[in-house]
Image (cartoon, rainbow, N blue to C red):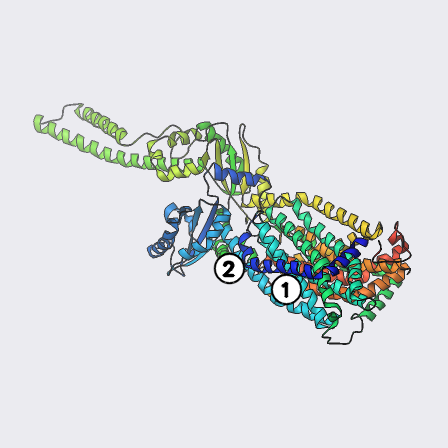
Amino acid sequence: MRVFYRLGRFDYRWRWALLAVWGLLVATGAFFAPRIGGELEGGGFDGAGTEAERVQDIMVEEFGVSPATLTVVFDGGGLDARSEEFRRAEREALEPLREMEEVRHVSTYASTGDPRFVSEDGGETYAVVAFDASIDRTQDLVEEVRRKVRSDRLETYVTGAPAVYQDIQVASNEDIRKAEKYAFPLAVLILIFAFGTVVAAGVPVLIGGASVLSTFAVLYFVAGSYDMSIFVLTISTMLGLGLGIDYALFAVSRFREELEDYPVEEAIPRTVATAGRSIFFSGMAVLIGLSGLMFFPFMFMRSIGAGGAIVVFVSVAAALTLLPAFLGVLGHRVNALSIRRHRGAPGTRFWSRSAELVMRRPVAVILAVGAVLGALLYPALHMKLAVPEASVLPRKYESRAGDDILKREFDYQALNPIQVVATLSHDPLSPAGLAGVKELGERLRATGEVRELTSVYTVGERAALQYARRVEEARERARARAERRVEEAVEEQLAGLRARLGFVPPGAEERIREEAQRRAEAELERRVPELPEGVTPERVTPEGVANFLSLPAARDSERLRQAVDSYVAGDRALIQVVGRDNPYSERAYAAVEEIRSVEPPQGTSFLVGGLSAGQRDFIASLYGKAPYVVGFVLGVTYLILLFTFRSVFIPLKAVVVNILSLTASFGAMVFVFQDGHLSGLLNFTPLGFVDATLPILMFCTIFGVSMDYEVFLLSRIREAYENGDSNTASVAKGLTSTAGIITSAAAIIIAVTGAFAFTGIVLIKAVGLGLAVAVFVDATIIRVLLVPATMRILGDWNWWPGGRRTTFHPDGGD
């Protein structure tokens, strides 16, 4: 296209001005890079308006539940959590938190009497710190809470969602530094091997670094007005380094070729017209893939899509402006500091022979590749999806360590109950309302998924039964005392009669006894209250619960009043359900569906929320939109490639083989992170499932990145074809001419993304490993075998309906 040739001429003419502009942008990025982490946020998994989200809103707005909580886990190192020494140390550690302005209340075993606050072995306990602040604001307070809650006697661990997000932010910064430490040296070594000169090798590294720093500058200002996930920082670094270096590698390689036949002022526009044009359309493919994430309503996904789009835009802009300007200044000095004699791209003879072999046996090659890809895909057939939290972090982080203790030592299901919010047609504390709550609870139990259930009815019923038994016990004691007093009174009066009369008149004893018993019964009724209607020591009816809650004994009990108030708000009643399975498991998600399928009593409706419901809804919402995302990415990519190559079949083949390369990364993801293989080498705890966001993140990221090599390879094949070579010769020429440079580019992507597989956060590990595997498969099996084989079978149909042109002109409209 002539526009790219003109852009190259512009780059050369204004090279110094362009370098100055980019220098300013890089300097700005270097200034803001250390500050960008503070602008990014954790979480971002809500916003779809799901049922679980509506329940959470109702809990906060109507039931007065705190918007955010932290859990402080205390380990006494062998000291009994119920002992006075332990409780005193716990009280002293928590006292500074109670004085914090943002803290609403602190719940402990001492304040609630709830045995679930103490571990099964009695050696640990925890406190729930509720905040009058959002999760984001609470996240900012995590380090302050950790400083204040430390104890000389107890080990303390601050965990909970805000603490996890804070630790992820710290871990992300550490991961970037760790990955860069290994990725840059490896990239430099690969580039030196590919180019044979230090200067040529250094240019892509400089461009990649400039792309990342410039991206940071843009992200800093975008994050100030648009919510961005903390994971954007790591993904941006990964893609910025990989794409920035790769694009520069292709351009520098082409520039050196053009320098052999043209002066610098002509080599620059010809490089932009050829390699630059390929970079532009490759960037479009990556941009399309990442923009698919914008379809999702979750900030986490949208921000990665937006951040990734910024990275790609900056990387392509750098490759089309900064790099040509820099090469225009360097000129022939790009070949300076040679470390080996230039003998063409490494491995050219190997790629040439492999191309000839594939051309002779295309069908056999396709079948063999299909078998290999099928084997790589096989582990993905038993993929399980879930949404982890603290488990994505290494064990060294406090929030992960505290969460592990809660899972290991406490009833984790009870800590994360399913929340059922019922809307009633009667006052929840009226007999009819309580009957509705009771009936709904019985229907929930009938599902078989409920281990324990708590509601205003069960709280009132339990309290009424306890009250009835206390009254009955008091009545029995009072009756025994009354009987003794009756006997004493009878004996006293009989003795008086004998003293006065010398005898007891007939019938006097019966009359005296009847009177004494009458007075005793009246005293008993006065001292021991009657049980309200519907309440007995053995059974309580909904009417009985309502009658009991109206008694002074119930109204005057602050603990009972608080318990009842926590389960009632207006015409709504809360039912807390403890399931039988780990709240992160697929069985727990199935339990949520079973509970939601319950038919409510007449005049009653209900919503289901809580941890398991929230995760189930997140996954359902995520994969409900996934088909639209896949359709958008595939469709628009096809159209872009159709426009690029003016062929119907080339884009179709490119999309299909790209999907095949994804199968390898999905299989590797399950094999490693779900099944736990290589967990020792990569230093993580196997999850037993795959993070639900990973398949979509990897599709949107990998699809575009792996398309890069397809575009560069096809561009050279098309160039040869339009210069008059046959289809078979064009494929062989394109493969051999790009083999070394694409191999080097793939090696760089593998080095950069593979370095992130050794970082701390499991999600980043998985994306890094998935990209590395996909690129490796694409640059070897797909590009070396499958692409040439399919193009050999299609023949000239590859280029239908565009056909060939007689001569290829980089500066002429191709």
At numbered mark 1, what does the secondary structure look like: helix, strand or loop? helix
Give the left or right position of residue 54, taking residue 654 as reference: left
Whole-Å distance between the Cαs marked 1 and 2? 21 Å
Screen quadrant of the C terminus: bottom right
Would you say residue 415 is visible in this rendering? yes
- Which residue is more in the foreground, 219 or 640? 219
The location of residue 95, given as percent across then percent down, is 36, 52
Labels in figure, total = 2
Q: Position of residue 312 (x, y in %)?
A: 68, 55
Q: Amino acid at mark 2?
A: Tyr
Residue at image point 19% right, 24% down? 511
Which quadrant of the figure contains the N terminus?
A: bottom right
Category of crowding for the residue at label 1, using alpha-carbon neighbours closer than 10 angstroms: few (below 14), some (14–19), many (at least 20): many
Of the pair 429 and 507, the residue shown nearer to us: 429
Characterize the local packing of mark 2: few (<14), some (14-19) or many (20 or more) Cα atoms within 10 angstroms.
many
Q: Quadrant of residue 475?
A: top left
Residue 417 locus on image (x, y percent) = 51, 44
Residue 332 in the image: above or below residue 92 = below
Q: Which mark is residue 755?
A: 1
Q: Secondary structure at mark 2?
A: loop
Task: Name the foreground residue: 684 vs 210.
Answer: 210
Give the label, 1 or 2, closer to the camera: 1
Residue 698, image quadrant: bottom right
User: Mark 2 — residue?
Assistant: 397
The residue lying at 30 percent from left, 36 percent from top is 474
Quadrant in the rendering for residue 719: bottom right
Q: Amino acid at mark 1?
A: Ala
Is residue 763 visible in the rendered structure shown here?
Answer: no
Q: Please, is residue 125 above or below residue 577 in the view? A: below
Say whether marks 1 and 2 touch (CB < 8 Å): no
